[in-house]
Image (cartoon, rainbow, N blue to C red):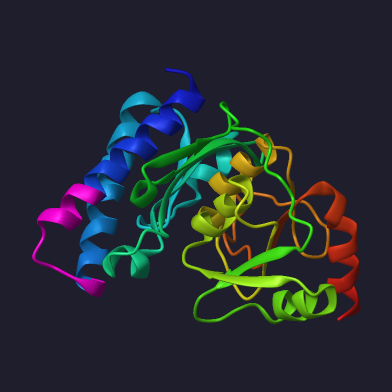
Amino acid sequence: MTDAELAATLAHDAGQLLLDLRSKSTLAGKELGNAGDKAANNLLISAIHKYRPDDGLLSEESKDTNARLKKDRVWIIDPVDGTREYGEGRSDWAVHVALAIHNKAQLGAVSLPGLDMILRSDSPIDRPQRAEKLRLVVSRSRPAKEAVAVADILDAELIPMGSAGAKAMAIVRGEADVYLHSGGQYEWDNCAPVAVAQAHGLHCSRIDGKPLEYNQPNTYLPDLLICHPQDAKKILDLVGSL
C-alpha cells in the first residue's frame, strides 16, 4: 500500500472497530469513549509499527517521546476525535490518520464512521461549493470568541458541531464554509483534517496567517483556520483587528 492508501485503510478499520464496539458494548458516555480510545489506538499503533516500522509516531492516546523528533516522517493519529460525541451515540466524531513529512501535513485520511464516509487527501471529492451567506462551524459547547465575532461582522450563520475532524470535513463536504478555531488543539486534532482540506484546495493556516507546523517538541497547536481561498485574507484581517 502507498502511504495514502495505508492512512485510509487504517482510518476505515479503526472506524469499523469503534462502531462495532459501540453497538455491542454495555458501556455508555465517558466509559464507552475511553474504551473506544484504547481499542482504536491499539489497532492503529500496531498497524503502523507493522507496515511503517521506521517512521515516527505521535498519538493522542500514547505516551509521547522525543524519538519522533529525529524522524522526517511521522504518523500523527487521533483514534477518536470527539470522544464525547462517540460516547453519546452521535455521528459528529472522527478517526484521524495523517503522515507529516518535514513538519508539514503531507497526506491523511479522516473517517466519519457515523456517516459511513472517509475523506482522503489522495482521492479528493468534488470541490466544495461556497455559500453566498457564509456558514461557520463552531464548537457545540464553547464557540471560539473570534468565530462568533467574525460571524457577527460578516452576517454569517453559526453551525454548532462536535469534533474538530467533523467540523473540518463539513467544509470539505460543502456543508459549511469556514472553520475558525481558537482556544486549544493539539497536532493530532488537525493534522489529518488539514491534509485532506489542503488536497481539496482549501486554505489552511493559523489564525494569524502563519503556516501550520507538525512534529514539534510542544504538540500544542491552539488555533486554526480552514476556509475557501477567496475568504482567507478577509477573515485573517478581521481576526487581526479584534
* Residue at the image point whose x is 86% and y is 50% from the top: 230
Name the residue nearer the viewer: 113 or 190. 113
Q: Is residue 201 visible?
A: yes
Say whether residue 198 is magenta.
no
- Asked which quadrant contains residue 198, the reply is top right
* Residue at the image point whose x is 35% and y is 57% from the top: 61
On the rendered structure, is 1 left or right of 73?
A: left
Q: Is residue 74 visible?
A: no
* Residue at the image point whose x is 34% and y is 64% from the top: 90
Q: Which residues are magenta?
A: 19-30
**Main secondary structure type of the part rendered in magenta:** helix
- Residue 159 location (% of width, % of height): 59, 69
Q: Is residue 68 above or below residue 158?
A: above
On the rendered structure, is 22 left or right of 5?
A: left
- Residue 241 location (% of width, % of height): 91, 77
* Residue at the image point whose x is 55% and y is 62% from the top: 186
- Residue 179 location (% of width, % of height): 66, 61
For the C terminus, the image quarter is: bottom right
- Residue 207 location (% of width, % of height): 77, 64
- Asked which quadrant contains residue 217, the reply is bottom right
Say whether residue 20 is magenta.
yes
For the N terminus, the image quarter is: top left
Q: Is residue 121 above or below residue 14?
A: above
Point out the residue furthest to the front here.
Answer: 132
* Total marks in image: 0
Name the residue nearer the viewer: 53 or 199. 199
Q: Is residue 80 above or below residue 235?
A: above
